Image: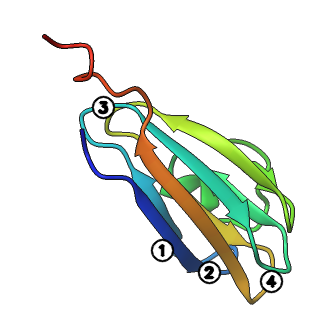
């Protein structure tokens, strides 16, 4: 089982070429709790390309300031973030979604 991760990161603005990476799963599913601790709305996506334009209409998830949600990533899947305006920040907790080796004999 991989170690769990706790982190807080700054969120870049909408329309930049490099959204912030929150997490990327390895060979096992990953559970990620994301909390928007910044002052502005943030946009999350499983593809960096979805967050590259200001007219975000599909393939994104909106998380208002002060809210949190849990996401489960498939193996090798990632999650990226941008914010609506400056000063965006998120904190997150990531761990393997289903420990697979505790049941092995």
Front disc: 1 or 3: 3
Instruction: Determine whether, in the image, residue 51 is placed left or right of residue 18.
Output: right
Instruction: Determine whether, in the image, residue 25 is placed left or right of residue 44.
Output: left
Task: Tell me the residue that label 4 is attached to.
Answer: 85
Front disc: 3 or 2: 3
Task: Tell me the residue that label 1 is attached to.
Answer: 18
Question: Which picture quadrant has residue 63?
Answer: bottom right
Task: Tell me the residue that label 3 is attached to.
Answer: 28
Front disc: 1 or 2: 2
- Decide: is 21 above or below 46: below
Whole-angstrom CA distance, mark 4 to mark 2, is 8 Å
SS at mark 2? loop
Which residue is situated farthest in the front direction here? 105
Judge the density around disc 2: few (<14), some (14-19), many (≥20) Cα neighbours within 10 Å: many
SS at mark 4? loop
What numbered label is drawn on residue 12?
2
Judge the density around disc 3: few (<14), some (14-19), many (≥20) Cα neighbours within 10 Å: some
Contact flag, marks 1 and 2 (Cβ < 8 Å): yes
Residue 60 visible to an observer of this rendering? no
Which residue is situated farthest in the bottom direction here? 86
Which badge, 1 or 2, comes first in the chain's sequence?
Answer: 2
Which badge, 1 or 3, comes first in the chain's sequence?
Answer: 1
Whole-angstrom CA distance, mark 3 to mark 2, is 28 Å
Which badge, 3 or 2, comes first in the chain's sequence?
Answer: 2
Q: Which one is nearer the viewer's eye here, 22 or 48?
A: 22
Q: Name the residue: 74% across, 43% down.
A: 58
Which badge, 4 or 2, comes first in the chain's sequence?
Answer: 2
């Amino acid at each position: 089982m991989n170690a769990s991760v706790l982190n807080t990161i700054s969120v870049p603005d909408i329309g930049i070429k490099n959204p912030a990476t929150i997490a990327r799963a390895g060979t096992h599913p990953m559970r990620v709790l994301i909390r928007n601790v910044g002052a502005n709305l943030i946009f999350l996506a499983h593809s960096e390309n979805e967050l590259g334009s200001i007219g975000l209409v599909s393939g994104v998830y909106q998380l208002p300031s002060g809210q949190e949600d849990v996401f489960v990533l498939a193996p090798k899947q990632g999650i990226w973030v941008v914010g609506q305006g400056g000063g965006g920040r998120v904190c997150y907790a990531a761990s393997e979604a289903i420990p697979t080796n505790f049941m092995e004999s």
